[in-house]
Image (spheres, grey):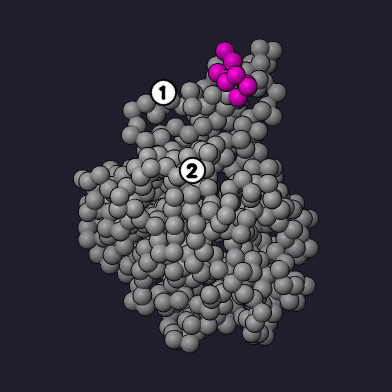
Amino acid sequence: MHTIKNPLLRVEQMATDVEGLICGEVRRTFGEFVSRCRRLGTVLSDLGTDRGDRVAIISFNSIEFIELYCGIPAAGRVQVPLNFRWADPELAYALEDSGANVLFIDRDPGALAELVETVVRLDTGDYAARIDAAAETDFDADIGPDDLAGLFYTGGTTGASKGVMLTHANLIANTYNAQMLFPLDERDVYQVIAPLFHAAGSVAVLQCLYVGARQVVVPVFNPAAILDQIEAEQVTSTLGVPSMLAAQVETQLVEPRGVSSLRLYAHGGSPVPLEVIRRGVQAFPGTEFAHLYGATETAPLITGMRREEQELDGERAASCGTPALGVEIRIQQSDGTPHPLGQPGDVLVRGDNVMAGYWNKPEQTAAVLQDGWYNTGDVGRLDEQGNLYLLDRSKDMIISGGENVYCTEVEDAIYTHPGVLEAAVFGIPSEQWGEAVHAVVVPRESTPVTPDEIVTHVRGLIAGYKVPQTVEMRADELPKSGPGKVLKRELRAPYWADQDSQIH
């Protein structure tokens, strides 16, 4: 199987003089892009890094980010892209956990600079000067498919945050899956709108390079500006999380642009309300919609449903499609035995796209990887045609606006407030975000606390998208099972009583 250097070599050979990447006023040919990726290898050597060293990235979307995404693993190092929305304690944890010794960042690193040997600024001319002065070098000839290409962190602070180890083989397998589920070619102009640190943002980077499709990179999501860019650059395809799709649809319906070039809009990260797709058909007439399902641990694509707009009135509209080529899915009971067809159970996945494991976390790895099968933590069922229907998540996790929010992280932050006796966090339905973070708090009698005080307290500890959007105060203790575990399902039930499934 190929490694990340192969799509770089291929596009350099077949389209070196073709304009391949656009971001704002910056426009680069594929040849210029690959040249800079080669020079990055020299820069990494000059910075004292060796094969297998971890190199972190904190940045908004940019062509430079894509250079780092490709050039770091092509040089035999391991990229560690981090969520720029995280609070400093979350970023510090991931930097220390990964052991990164170099940080590429597009802002003042503050105290984070003390955690790495070298900081390279992307926003001050430092990175550009280093690249311009560096000699081109060959990509690492010894890297193989099983070598680690990146650590992709799935959570926030302390034990909940895990570095997903994705190999070159994992990312190349995902590239093939992407080409099968939403095919591109050299005529396509692909708009990168989701954050590149997120699987939804980087999912098509290598695919575009393999086939010579132009990439238009959006630094920060703005629905009106993105629609303007679709019209100006004649964008043909894109992928966003449902909250992005919904915002673009509403903006286009109110202030329509010329978007007839857009032939394909793929969405993933969390389920999307069918009403958003119905309105999307009005906003983007003639555009094909594709529903994708995946996870960071699967690099990320697992299933896909093409031509979703044609399925809106049928049963299949509730599914996330069939497995990508080379991906197997099975539904099993809690005791590990297979479930009969059509019956709900744990969703397991096997394929070349499945991660190598969690960085430095053998117990957590063993809990989800067994005989090559990855337990997604989702509950679903398969129909006779192989369509997967997701029903619930067995993991204690919320997906809000395409971002993973681990309930234990939010609860840990809430519990640091001296006025909190008990707390439980779970997701409730949200038309805008899919799910909203909701907290139920039992205050201490001696220290009264208000919902606003809870929100203010946790905002300085965790990323903004993890902060509870609603807080319910209770006088009585939380319901518990015999062993003393909080019965979150009981707390969640009233909010989901009128929903068709427990995923919104």
Q: Quick check: 471 above or below 477?
A: below
Q: Position of residue 259 (x, y in %)?
A: 27, 62
Q: Which residues are magenta?
A: 476-485
In the rendered image, residue 20, in percent from the top left (x then y), is placed at 44, 77
Question: Mark 1 belongs to which amino acid?
Answer: Pro
Which quadrant of the structure image shows residue 325? bottom left
Q: At 64% from the left edge and 42% from the top edge, which residue is drawn?
A: 160
Establish if 221 lies above or below 63: above
Where on the picture, by quarter, is residue 291?
Answer: bottom left
Residue located at (70% from left, 64% from top): 54
Whether residue 502 sits left or right of residue 365 in the image: it is: left
The residue tagged 1 is 494
Nearer to the camera, 439 or 327 = 327
**The C terminus is located in which quarter?**
top left
Residue 168 horizontal side relative to residue 350, left or right: right
Numbered tag placed on residue 337 in the rendering: 2
* Numbered disc 1: secondary structure: helix
